[in-house]
Amino acid sequence: MKVKSFAAFDPTSPLKPLHFERRAVGPSDVQIEIQYCGICHSDIHTARSEWGPASYPLVPGHEIVGKVTAVGKSVTKFKVGETVGVGCMVGSCGQCASCAEGLEQYCVPGFVGTYNSPATDGTGHTQGGYSSGIVVDQNFVLRIPAGMDPARAAPLLCAGITTYSPLRHWKIGRGMKVGIIGLGGLGHMGVKIASAMGAEVVMLTTSPKKADDAKRLGARSVLVTTDPDAMAQQAETFDFLLDTVSAQHDLTSYLNLLKREGQMVMVGAPEKPLPLPTFALIFRRKNLAGSLIGGIRETQEMLDFCAKHGITADIEMIAPEQINDAYNRMLKSDVRYRFVMDCQKL
Ligand code: NAP
Ligand code: ZN
């Protein structure tokens, strides 16, 4: 299938149009005409080679929703015409202990990323969702629940699952005080999902002007993290913190918010390693962990959970040629709260 796309050609130039050929539909493949693709901060980190040298030209995008236009002869899970999603992974070994448990994101030899991964089909490296179409193995395709707005569903495929998975893993629910750090794409999903799970959610932000939005999204209250007095007042009161910050920041002031033995989880992945505030952990036996997206089974569970609770993303729709402006606005923390590319306009 010939597709149109937007691609990064090097770490610094603006993204530009690229035409290329997707692989032919194999027996287990689903061909998708992409309608919408969310814009994740990971796309920027990767396009700019912040996480290591990227393979160019690179088509980012791993929050994909579209319609099935063809299926391979052994495909049983999807039919032509269905609305489906693709997230951050398009393959994994299928053999290791993690894959056996449905935790493909922790595949021991490594999962195949939707973009910037070596392709197993001879096309070089994988190319993502800022494009008009994609071909994906049926085992990495998700069902978008009936009635869910497809554009607002797209960001669930990364921002949704990346926040849902740690909230589920650490059994967030009623009676827990949970802080979501950073009100961007991930953070706004984290607030919605954690409050739907029954927790008392506090939005931790550097942007006081986002406070009203945070409450509308489900936060009980807002803590401006640049205000040392406000931070001191809430010291040692949180059960759980989810850090979605995309840039350098000092963890000490956040760790001080946790109760004794409280849990902080990093999902934000800044370019450079953060210094570890050892004393802030030692003195109250605190826990610091990381979490990576979520497995395919859990991603479907998250989509169904969101459908049940009426949760989708708050989006700003962009035309493909606005992608470079969208990147610049995200770098200024100016997004309400996820850009979504209308790929039908490619
Ligand atoms: P985003 O929409 O740009 O949001 C990031 C938010 O972080 C900003 O809106 C801002 O919120 C806050 N922030 C930015 N700079 C800050 C600073 N210097 N200090 C404190 N807060 C700051 O990004 P995103 O798409 O949600 O992604 C967030 C991070 O998660 C990225 O690093 C991304 O690569 C990573 N990620 C990880 C996974 C995973 O599996 N672990 C999956 C997807 C994305 P306020 O204005 O509210 O302060
Ligand atoms: Zn992402």
Image: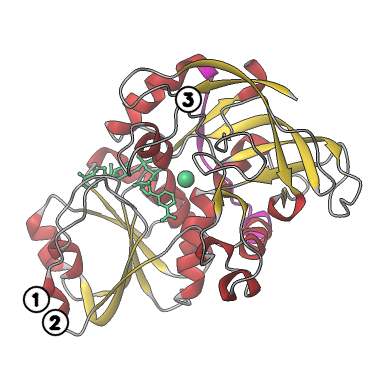
Identified by mark 3, the residue type is: Pro
Q: Which residue is mark 2?
A: 282
**Vertical side of 51 occupied by 220: above or below:** below
Q: Residue pushed farthest front?
A: 122
> Could you tell me which residue is drawn at 75 percent across and 35 percent down?
32
Amino acid identity at mark 1: Phe
Q: Is residue 248 left or right of residue 180?
A: left
Q: CA distance from mark 2 to mark 3?
A: 45 Å
- Which numbered dot is residue 279? 1
Can residue 173 be seen here? no
The percent position of residue 252, horizontal first and vertical second, equals: 13, 64
* Quarter occupied by the N terminus: top right
Q: Is residue 310 magenta?
A: yes
Q: CA distance from mark 1 to mark 2?
A: 5 Å
According to the picture, the residue beneath numbered tag 3 turns out to be: 57
Magenta residues, start to end = 305-320
Q: Position of residue 16 (x, y in %)?
A: 47, 15
Residue 277 is left or right of residue 79, and the answer is: left
Closer to us: 283 or 131: 131
The answer to whether any part of residue 206 appears in the image is yes
Q: Classify the position of the C terminus by image quarter.
A: top right
Label 1 CB less than 8 angstroms from ligand 1:
no
Farthest residue, direction right: 73
Q: How many residues crowd around disc 1 within 10 Å: few (fewer than 14), some, or many (20 or more)? A: few
